[in-house]
Amino acid sequence: MTVIVAAMGWSWQEADVDPLTGAISASPHDRGPDRADFAALEHAMSLAEKWDAQVIAATVGPAEADEMLKDALAAGATGALRVEPARRSSRPRPAELVGGGQNRPAALAAALRQRYGVPDLVLCGDRSADRGTGSFPAFLAAALNAAQALGVVRLEPEGDGELRVHRRLDGGRREVLRVRRPAVVSVEAAGVRLRRAGLPETLASRRAVIPVIDAPAAAGHRVPVLGAHPYRPRPREIPVPSGTALHRTLQLTGALAERTPPTVLGPLSPEQAADELLGYLRRRGYLAAGDPG
């Protein structure tokens, strides 16, 4: 049977950064899915209705994430899966942004293979609220050896089990791709709202038992983080002022530096204004002497 996985994130919604020390603090209760994760779940259930597939809501997170998965079951997901992370922290860790980018996708991929094999389709939010890099779906696609389409705003199922997806590009343009399974697709919120769960389904989901798989030990080399602190640019070296007090003041304020004084021209006709502008560009070296512009 076709398996569609909605990979939902368990991320920090808000965090405070001390501007002096760089310390990060956040409320332990302020964690949960992002709007894009809800959009991924809604897209997964809409596709499941057309493909006669089962939807699995999965996440990598602590036991507190079970409530999020139960809400997904109430909304219509067929099953749920939680991967217990190898390391837990009470606050966001800057080191995870540098050295832990591949651990969670690899853990989720291993758990999905163990329980369902390689899923036909995995839908994720395009970026989480805390990291915001959008690297999770790409690492997950690499771990599953699946095709990927990132930053999708529209999904259109086709009769042969393929997907026609629309990606947002700069300048209001769109890129249309045909995605073959297995694939990992990350979606933007893009106005998609999760359907409301009924009362009987909500009550039944409270009694559901969420399967848990421990994440394997992290493999590979991690980047050691020796410290985290606010960015402070190095001071700019300037020559020591000399001469009289007035001369030293002029040197420190930059009044003696060569500069082009502002020129006010006008009113001019459009042709004269264009000639003045082209002449300035030629004097500054932006246009060659004979270049008509």
Image (spheres, grey):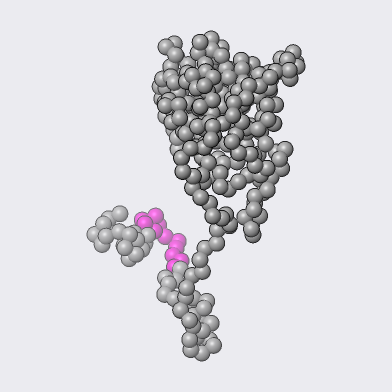
Left or right for 164, reference 84: left
Tell me where residue 209 appears, x and y as whole percent: 68, 19
Residue 275 is at least partly visible in this image: no
**Residue 270 lies in magenta, yes or no?**
yes
Q: Is 158 displayed left or right of 289 in the figure?
A: right
Q: Nearer the viewer, residue 191 or 123?
A: 123
Residue lying furthest left: 290
Say which of 183 and 268 sits in front.
183
Quarter of the image for residue 87 reads top right
Visible in this render: residue 21? yes
Pick the residue in front: 159 or 218.
Answer: 218
Question: Does the segment drawn in magenta span residue 258?
Answer: no
Residue 100 position, x and y percent, is 53, 41
Q: Residue placed at 44% from the left, 76% from the top?
A: 257
The quarter of the picture where the C terminus appears is bottom left
Is residue 15 toward the left or the right of residue 251 in the image? right
- Tell me where residue 168 appears, x and y as whole percent: 47, 32
Residue name at image x 48 percent, y 86 percent: 242
Q: Is residue 192 above or below residue 203?
A: below
Q: Is 35 situated above or below 158?
A: below
The residue positioned 57% from the left and 17% from the top of the image is 55
Position of residue 105 in the picture relative to residue 290 (left or right): right
Highlighted range, magenta: 263-275
Res 280 quadrant in image = bottom left
In the rendered view, tell whether residue 168 sits above or below residue 233: above
Q: Residue at x 52, y 18 (%)?
A: 116
What is the quadrant of residue 67 in the picture?
Answer: top right
Number of marks in the image? 0
Pick the front one: 126 or 173? 126
